[in-house]
Amino acid sequence: MPKAQGVAGAPCWVSLLARELPGAQDFYGKVLGWTYRRAGLGDDFSVALIDGLPVAGIGALASSLQVAVSWTPYFNVTDVDEAAARIRERGGTVGVGPLAFHTGRAALAVDPDGAVFGIWEGSVRSDWSMGRGSGSASLELRTRDAVTAGRFYSLALGWEPEGEGKLRLVREQELSLLLDGDEELARISGGAVQAAPDPQIRPRWHVRFNVKDVGAAVETALASGGSLVPGPDASVEVDGATLRDPDGALFTVTAAS
C-alpha cells in the first residue's frame, strides 16, 4: 500500500459515509465496476478499486457519527488541530473530530455556506489520482459565491492566491480552479445555488467519477435502487449525470476523457 506525505491543502481522498457496507459495495460495484479490499480499519471499512488502483473509501459510519449518508472529499493538512482552529476562525464548523484512525487523524467540517468536507493529517496514498483515468474522482464545490468560498478554503487549508506558490487558486471566468502546478485538483463554481435552503440545491462538494458509458451507468443505477437527480441535472447528457444511491448519497458520473 504505497504511502506518502502528500501536498498540504490538496485533496487526498474521497469517502462514502454509508449506513451499511455490503449494500453500498453492491450498488457501486454494479454501477461503477468497483472491486474492494479491506482498508485495515476494521470490518466497517473498504477501499474501492478500478484495475487494482484505489478510487475511494466506503465506511459504514453514518449511523455511529450521526451524519447523513454522503460522499465527502478529504484535504491533506500537516496539523489537523491547527486546521480545525483555522476553520472555526473563518466561520466554519468542525462537526466531528479530530479523531484518531489507523494511519492518522481526521475531522469532518462544514464551511460557512454549509458544504461538508474532511481534513486529514497522516500518510496518504501515492497511487490515488485525482481526475485521471476511468474510475478516478474529481471535485467541484457548487456554492453561492465562488470568490468568498475560495477565500475561506485558502485561509483554512493554506491555498495560495493566484500566481503564487505551487498549490494555488486561480480565477477563470465563472470558476475558481485549485491547481498543483498545471494540474487541476478541484474547482469552485458560484451562482448556481439558490438562497432557499432546498436540500437538492444547497452548497455542497460534488464528487464526480469517470465512467466509460454514462448512459449505461445511469441505467444500472436506476435498476439497482438509485435515482436520477431532478431539476437541471435530470437529463442524461453524454458527458455526465448526477445520481443518488439507494441511501440518498449524491454523486456524479462523467464521461472519461
Image (cartoon, rainbow, N blue to C red):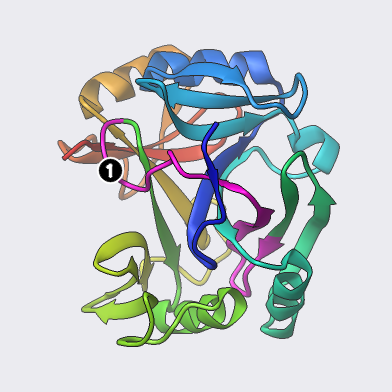
Tell me the amino acid under the disc marked 1: Arg
Residue at 48% across / 62% down in the picture?
10
Is 1 a magenta residue?
no
Residue 59 position by quadrant: top right
Q: Nearer the viewer, residue 124 or 162?
A: 124
Q: Is residue 62 above or below residue 151?
A: above
Residue 168 position by quadrant: bottom left
Report the side of 127 relative to 64 (left or right).
left
Residue at 24% across / 67% down in the picture?
182
Q: Is residue 121 visible?
A: yes
Q: Nearer the viewer, residue 252 or 21?
A: 21
Residue at 35% across / 15% down in the picture?
220
Give x and y (percent) for residue 212.
21, 26
Secondary structure, mark 1, is loop
**Quadrant location of the C terminus in the rendered image:** top left
Q: Is residue 222 visible?
A: no
Q: How many marks?
A: 1
Is 132 a magenta residue?
yes
Q: Which residues are magenta?
A: 109-134
**Quadrant location of the N terminus in the rendered image:** top right
Q: Nearer the viewer, residue 226 or 127?
A: 127
Q: Is residue 21 above or below residue 133?
A: above
Give x and y (percent) for residue 223.
40, 12
Q: Is residue 48 above or below residue 210?
A: above
**Which residue bears the numbered disc 1?**
132
Residue 197 position by quadrant: bottom right
Give x and y (percent) for residue 194.
45, 68
